[in-house]
Amino acid sequence: DVRLSVPLTLICIPDILKTMRITLQINDDLFARAKALAEEEGRTLDSVIEEGLVLVLDKRDKPSRKKFTLPVSKSKGGTLPGVDLDNWASLEEIMEDDRIFRTP
């Protein structure tokens, strides 16, 4: 699959005092898509290409997060002995007592 490319010269302005001109070889289809997007959004082609570079580089800079799976509980569940779920005052008192939730 042979694809032609269009030489593209960009002017990059990293800050007010510096300007850099570079020439890139970009696939014709990619160039047309970028140019169409720039026209559609009323932007310069430079800004579209710069945004694309930022997205790619930022994605690589972020460490990938490993998938985390919560362990499945093997407890039988239920309430502690003496806990009455219908008595709000008693429940509040139990929840405020941190001794109940400590493990030996």
Image (cartoon, helix red, strand yellow):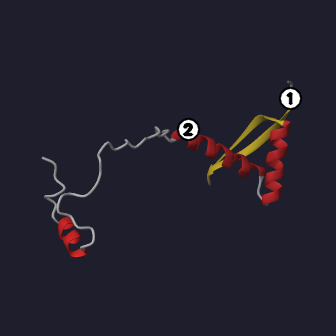
Q: Is residue 8 left or right of residue 13?
A: right
Q: Secondary structure at mark 1?
A: loop
Residue at the spot 56% in from the left edge and 38% down from the top edge: 60
The image's mark for residue 3 is 1
Report the residue that reaches farthest toward the top: 1
Quarter of the image that includes the N terminus: top right
Horizontal side, residue 81 vs residue 41: left or right: left
> Quick check: 17 left or right of 102?
right
Nearest the viewer among 8 and 97 is: 97
Give the image location of residue 66, x and y in percent: 46, 37
Name which of mark 2 and mark 1 comes first in the sequence.
Answer: 1
The residue located at (22%, 69%) in the rendering is 91
Residue type marked 1: Arg
Pick the residue in front: 8 or 53. Answer: 53
Q: Residue furthest bottom?
A: 89
Tag 2's secondary structure?
A: helix
Q: Position of residue 103 (x, y in %)?
A: 16, 48
Picture quadrant where residue 8 is located: top right
Q: Position of residue 44 (x, y in %)?
A: 77, 54
Badge number at residue 60: 2
The circle drawn on residue 38 is none
Q: Amino acid at mark 2?
A: Arg
- Other-residue count near label 1 (Cα within 10 Å), few / some / many at <14 / 14–19 / ≥20: few
Above-or-below relation of 37 to 4: below
**What is the tally of numbered marks visible in this picture?**
2
